[in-house]
Image: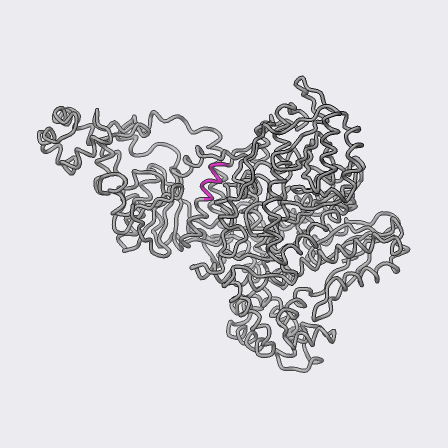
């Protein structure tokens, strides 16, 4: 079949209903941890993302069937009467799918009384009349009747494209014959009767000889002369069933004149609502897509630090690095094999490497160890091995509460074993005593040799630590190896990596423990079911190591990132997580009460301005109040043409009008209350009286750590309400909270990377960098720089780090675009090294597909050579920023390692004097004995400042207080 040429940025119409059903019945049948089905959602959204990435449309619509009957039911009461009702687990996916599509910024259409086909046909007809090429994305063959010189079909699930020439190749008839073809055969799924006794071959023969149904009905006797089986009986059938045939044709004909409010030119893609998308992806547990938003949100957060109104995403990333009810992420809930990995010309995951596999996986070779002799034999094998893979099975995803149920290990591909320890369902088997097994394994696990390999091994270290075992000798973590090779790739969980690198689908946790409310804890799973699943964990981990480790070693400096930063950091993070932080529950409860009062006062003020009570969280009511009753200017419209109330719109309106400002304050306080002041007290562990976050190494594209449960990164610090939350993070009795923060680290990295003489000199002399920049940009002596000039220079400094345009700078500073461009031009004249660095970086990124940090971490940019200018420009801005943000992350990790090493030396610190408790952005937070603060703080500052050597000094500022806010 020929490959039709599709023009750039076609008008795309998506048959949402067709894909919804196809995705529902196609594997994998995904669910989230709450047991809610998500497979159909994933399939449709994945297809939409594919279309967007491939064609970069500016105009598009996703069309779904509406509820209820259509005009075809009026024509023929039996139309689709045989169809079974929609399955409940498909119906439940429609609402979240529609929400995701809208949050993606895609126009969504559903018209009562007609089918999606009719809406698509009408829009395609309108576009064709304008001479515009329409690409209809569908899996429905009925749509082939719409194909003409302006309309092309694409089936993204089979990667099939049909134009006028391809339709006859596929179906044997021209597009204009498709209606007759369908009418003759009938359609059992739609209950279109058709002509009795006519199947595909007969219909093709009849149309080949007579061309159309009209010709057949006008000359039925001529049909008898055609050479196909049963031709002699056709004239009588045509006469007898004439009305049925014409009805069938009418039912099969797609309507082209549906009354629509929107025309093709109005179906414009809007900017995605990333915050809403993050909430929905989190709910569905589409973690790879959520990770992409997190990286975007991190950049937004940094923009906010530069004075932008942009807001950081709070994605939660619940157990993002891979733990579920058995202690490991083995569900691949949003994975769709290696085909969905992020592509890049220079990506570490080439197809040939992705297909690499070791020996075929034969689970029958796995051993279940239930007696001491067998265990002793295996223990000797482990002791004699150079390295082995190890994994734990537990009762909980919470590392502070997880109890050990069993241990698995592998010494070679296919040579794996499981030791059940606490299964309730013994199914006739026995199991060894847990304390005895742990006592036997303790020397092995605490020795540096043999070396250990794990997948998200930090979790396993927590589990063993609960039983008094400090795991040492970590050789590799396959999750981190994958992450270091390509941080912008798909998920780094075991299931995804197994599919991608071994071509093997692992046993899903649901397969052994069930789903939803009936899902068992792992100790409730029988040993017979648990053993192959658990042993496979260790086997796959070892196999992944055999594939990934050589690739890391072959990538030069990447091995240093893995071996000298990521792997040594694991025990440091585990130590911090175990220590936790202390919060004042009573203070948080008081804050919740205060916020409740503030929210009520804001509502009262809002009602007074509006002249009536309304729901501040209702978009529809807010649109009515703001734009109809108060007559505020419409800054932006939704895809349906309604005035937008998105956050950036309200922020712009809040500059001139009081009600949008109240709405924003209300939203911020409500979120703070639900996320922190209400939630944190419930997260305090009874056994420690503290809260324990989880730090994740394999989430962000830049290498920055993220945290969840609670998310410490997103507690706002630029408003009083957020600072009050930090006040509740308190020091234990006899201690102080000490926060040590790197000063302007990304600007210092910019100076180092760009080698700009002006910036290097300013930092070397310890000048206020923003004041020094203002002196250059505004051509005034340093001592005469005003606070307003410094503010503007600061915006320029930080804006350039993020590749800000003159338009963006103008909006931020509320100045003309010409003035903003003038500032930038003068800046580049005074600091030409910065502009040279930016241009050099863009070219390098375009040529090799990635940029690097100072430490050699690679940051891939899949869209650096995208045809769509907007996407390409965004990738270029990321290319400029990523080396700075990534280098800052690497420096922070190096500082954490140096600090931990310094604290470990008893000649430096007495036991119990200093604890490292948190890492947030460019800051480390400690608990230090109050009477030793003056002794330790200067030394810790020195350790952090000496973590790396740049061409400018690293400066760390320390703050001390009884709570985190005072110390920051």
Please state the horizontal and vertical placement of residue 94, each as a whole percent of the image: 46, 37
For the view shown, which residue lies furthest in the front direction? Answer: 384
Viewed as shown, does residue 811 lie left or right of 74? right
Residue at 67 percent of width and 57 percent of height: 889
What stretch of residues is rendered in magenta?
39-46
Would residue 45 be counted in the magenta stretch? yes
Please state the horizontal and vertical placement of residue 664, each as a whole percent of the image: 60, 53
Viewed as shown, does residue 786 lie left or right of 210? right
Please state the horizontal and vertical placement of residue 57, each as a whole percent of the image: 40, 54
Foreground: 52 or 862?
A: 862
Examine the rendering and report whether any part of residue 662 can be seen: no
Please state the horizontal and vertical placement of residue 826, each as a whole percent of the image: 57, 78
Examine the rendering and report whether any part of residue 486 can be seen: yes
Q: Looking at the picture, does residue 170 appear above or below residue 104?
A: above
Rendered image quadrant of residue 803:
bottom right
Q: Quadrant of the C terminus?
A: bottom right
For the view shown, which residue lies furthest in the right direction? Answer: 931
Viewed as shown, does residue 742 lie left or right of 544? right
Rendered image quadrant of residue 23:
top left
Residue at 80 percent of width and 32 percent of height: 439
Q: Looking at the picture, does residue 233 appear above or below residue 632?
A: above
Q: Looking at the picture, does residue 118 appear above or below residue 563?
A: above
Foreground: 287 or 338?
A: 338
For the view shown, which residue lies furthest in the top direction? Answer: 428
Q: Main secondary structure of the magenta part?
A: helix
Residue at 33 percent of width and 29 percent of height: 189
Foreground: 706 or 419?
A: 419
Would residue 145 be counted in the magenta stretch? no
């Amino acid at each position: 079949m020929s490959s039709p040429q599709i023009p750039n940025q076609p008008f795309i119409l998506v048959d949402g209903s067709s894909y919804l059903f196809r995705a529902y019945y196609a594997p994998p049948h995904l669910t989230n941890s709450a047991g809610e089905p998500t497979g159909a959602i994933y399939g449709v959204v994945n297809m939409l993302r594919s279309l967007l990435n491939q064609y970069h449309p500016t105009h598009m619509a996703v069309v779904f069937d509406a509820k209820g009957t259509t005009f075809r039911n009026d024509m023929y009461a039996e139309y689709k009467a045989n169809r079974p009702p929609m399955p409940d687990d498909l119906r439940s996916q429609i609402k979240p799918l529609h929400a995701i599509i809208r949050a993606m910024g895609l126009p969504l259409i559903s018209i009562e009384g007609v089918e999606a086909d009719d809406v698509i046909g009408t829009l395609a007809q309108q576009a064709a009349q304008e001479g515009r090429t329409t690409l209809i994305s569908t899996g429905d063959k009925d749509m082939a009747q719409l194909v003409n010189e302006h309309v092309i079909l694409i089936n993204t699930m089979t990667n099939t494209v049909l134009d006028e020439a391809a339709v006859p190749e596929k179906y044997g008839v021209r597009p204009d014959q498709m209606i007759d073809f369908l009418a003759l055969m009938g359609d059992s799924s739609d209950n279109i009767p058709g002509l009795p006794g006519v199947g595909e071959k007969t219909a093709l023969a009849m149309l080949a000889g007579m061309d159309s149904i009209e010709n057949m009905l006008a000359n039925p006797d001529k049909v008898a002369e055609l050479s196909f089986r049963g031709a002699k009986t056709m004239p009588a059938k045509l006469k007898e069933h004439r009305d049925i045939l014409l009805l069938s044709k009418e039912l099969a004909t797609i309507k082209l004149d549906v009354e629509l409010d929107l025309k093709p030119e109005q179906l414009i893609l809007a900017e995605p609502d990333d915050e809403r998308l993050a909430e929905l992806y989190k709910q569905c547990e589409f973690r790879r897509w959520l990770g992409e938003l997190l990286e975007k949100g991190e950049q937004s957060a940094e923009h906010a630090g530069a004075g932008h109104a942009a807001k950081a995403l709070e994605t939660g990333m619940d157990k993002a690095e891979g733990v579920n009810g058995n202690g490991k992420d083995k569900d691949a809930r949003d994975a769709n094999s290696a085909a969905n990995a992020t592509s890049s010309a220079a990506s570490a995951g080439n197809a040939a490497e992705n297909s690499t596999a070791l020996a075929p996986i034969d689970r029958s070779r796995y051993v279940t160890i239930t007696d001491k002799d067998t265990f002793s034999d295996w223990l000797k094998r482990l002791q004699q091995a150079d390295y082995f893979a190890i994994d734990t099975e537990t009762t909980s995803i919470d590392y502070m509460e997880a109890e050990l149920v069993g241990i698995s290990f592998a010494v070679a591909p296919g040579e794996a074993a499981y030791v059940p320890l606490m299964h309730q369902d013994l199914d006739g088997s026995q199991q060894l005593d847990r304390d005895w097994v742990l006592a036997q394994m303790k020397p092995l696990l605490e020795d540096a040799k043999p070396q250990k390999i794990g997948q998200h091994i930090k979790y396993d270290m927590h589990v063993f630590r609960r039983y008094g075992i400090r795991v040492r000798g970590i050789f590799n973590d396959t999750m981190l190896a994958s992450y270091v090779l390509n941080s912008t790739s798909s998920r780094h969980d075991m299931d995804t990596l197994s599919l991608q690198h071994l071509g093997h689908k692992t046993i899903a946790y649901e397969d052994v423990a069930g789903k939803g409310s009936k899902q068992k804890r792992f100790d409730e799973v029988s040993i017979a079911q648990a053993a192959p699943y658990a042993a496979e964990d260790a086997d796959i981990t070892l196999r992944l190591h055999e594939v990934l480790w050589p690739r890391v070693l072959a990538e030069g400096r990447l091995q240093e990132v893995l071996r000298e930063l990521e792997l040594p950091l694991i025990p440091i993070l585990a130590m911090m997580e175990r220590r936790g932080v202390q919060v004042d529950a009573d203070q948080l409860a008081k804050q919740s009460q205060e916020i409740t009062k503030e929210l009520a006062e804001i509502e009262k003020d809002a009602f007074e301005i509006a002249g009536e009570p309304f729901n501040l969280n209702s978009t529809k009511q807010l649109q009515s109040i703001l734009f109809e009753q108060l007559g505020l200017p419409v800054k932006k419209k939704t895809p349906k043409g309604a005035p937008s109330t998105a956050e950036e719109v309200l922020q712009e309106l809040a500059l001139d009008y009081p009600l949008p400002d109240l709405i924003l304050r209300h939203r911020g306080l409500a979120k703070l209350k639900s996320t922190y002041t209400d939630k944190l007290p419930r997260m305090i562990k009874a056994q420690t009286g503290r809260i324990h976050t989880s730090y994740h190494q394999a989430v962000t594209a830049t290498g920055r750590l993220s945290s969840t449960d609670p998310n410490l990164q997103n507690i706002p610090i630029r408003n009083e309400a957020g600072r009050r939350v930090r006040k509740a993070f308190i020091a234990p009795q006899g201690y102080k909270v000490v926060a040590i923060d790197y000063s302007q680290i990304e600007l210092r990295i910019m100076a180092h990377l760009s080698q700009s003489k002006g910036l290097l000199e300013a930092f070397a002399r310890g000048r206020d960098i923003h004041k020094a920049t203002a002196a250059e940009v505004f051509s005034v002596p340093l001592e005469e720089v005003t606070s307003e000039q410094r503010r503007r220079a600061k915006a320029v400094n930080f804006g350039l780090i993020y590749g800000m345009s003159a338009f963006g700078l103008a909006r931020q500073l509320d100045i003309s675009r010409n003035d903003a461009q003038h500032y930038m031009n003068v800046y580049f004249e005074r600091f030409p090294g910065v502009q040279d660095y930016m241009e050099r970086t863009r070219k390098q990124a375009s040529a090799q597909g990635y940029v690097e940090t100072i430490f050699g971490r690679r940051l891939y940019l899949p869209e650096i050579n995208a045809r769509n200018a907007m996407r390409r420009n965004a990738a270029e801005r990321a290319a400029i920023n990523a080396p700075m943000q990534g280098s800052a992350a690497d420096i922070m990790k190096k500082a954490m390692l140096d600090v931990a090493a310094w604290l470990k030396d008893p000649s430096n610190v007495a036991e119990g004097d200093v604890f490292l408790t948190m890492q947030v952005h460019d800051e480390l937070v400690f608990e230090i004995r109050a009477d030793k603060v003056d002794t330790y703080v200067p030394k810790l500052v020195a350790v952090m400042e000496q973590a790396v050597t740049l061409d400018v000094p690293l400066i760390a500022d320390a703050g001390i207080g009884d709570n985190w806010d005072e110390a920051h």
